[in-house]
Image (spheres, rainbow, N blue to C red):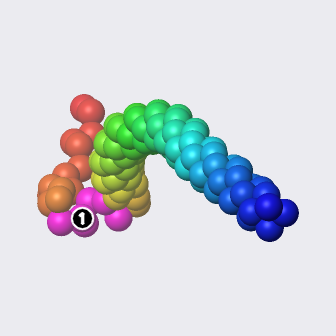
Amino acid sequence: MFYLEKYLKKLTGNSDIEDSLQRLDKLTQEEARMASAELLRITHSVEEKVMGVDNRVKGVDDKIQGIDGEVRDVGDKVQNLDGKLDDISRSSSPLSCFSSRRLKPFRRKPAPR
């Protein structure tokens, strides 16, 4: 009877160990699911923040495009002004009567009588 009692204790002990291992396995799986859920929550949060930054960058890009157009307009105005200054400079030079733009004959005014 001693051996039978010892054998039964081993069998019941093994089932306790197996039950404990099964509970540990379930807890481990539940912990993995919880960790995955937390990771998914964090991922969604990061995605929302990235989308916010993306929208801001697009806004900055639009503003830069507008400024680019304004800078081109200023550049065109500066070139026009430069051309006008060249015209003024040529017309006010001592040799302006010989310029190709203004070929007027030189006439003296008659002396008053």
Q: Position of residue 57 (x, y in %)?
A: 45, 41
- Looking at this view, name the residue that lies furthest to the front: 1
Tell me: 62 left or right of 106. right
| Quarter of image, res 99 | bottom left
Depth check, front residue: 43 or 72: 43
| Quarter of image, res 9 | bottom right
> Going 18% across and 56% down the picture, which residue do you hit?
102
Tell me: 109 left or right of 14. left
Q: Is residue 38 above or below residue 32?
A: above
**Residue 101 seen:** yes
**Residue 35 seen:** no
> Going 25% across and 66% down the picture, which residue do you hit?
98
Instruction: Write down the residue under mark 1.
Output: 99
Which structural element holds mark 1? loop
Q: Is residue 46 above or below residue 97?
A: above
> Going 23% across and 50% down the picture, which residue do you hit?
108
Dot 1 amino acid type: Ser
Quarter of the figure that contains the N terminus: bottom right
Q: Position of residue 109 (x, y in %)?
A: 23, 43
> Going 18% across and 66% down the picture, which residue do you hit?
100
Tell me: 99 left or right of 89. left
- Asked if residue 38 lies in the magenta stretch, the reply is no
Depth check, front residue: 90 or 55: 55
Q: Position of residue 18 (x, y in %)?
A: 64, 56
Span colored in magenta: 95-100
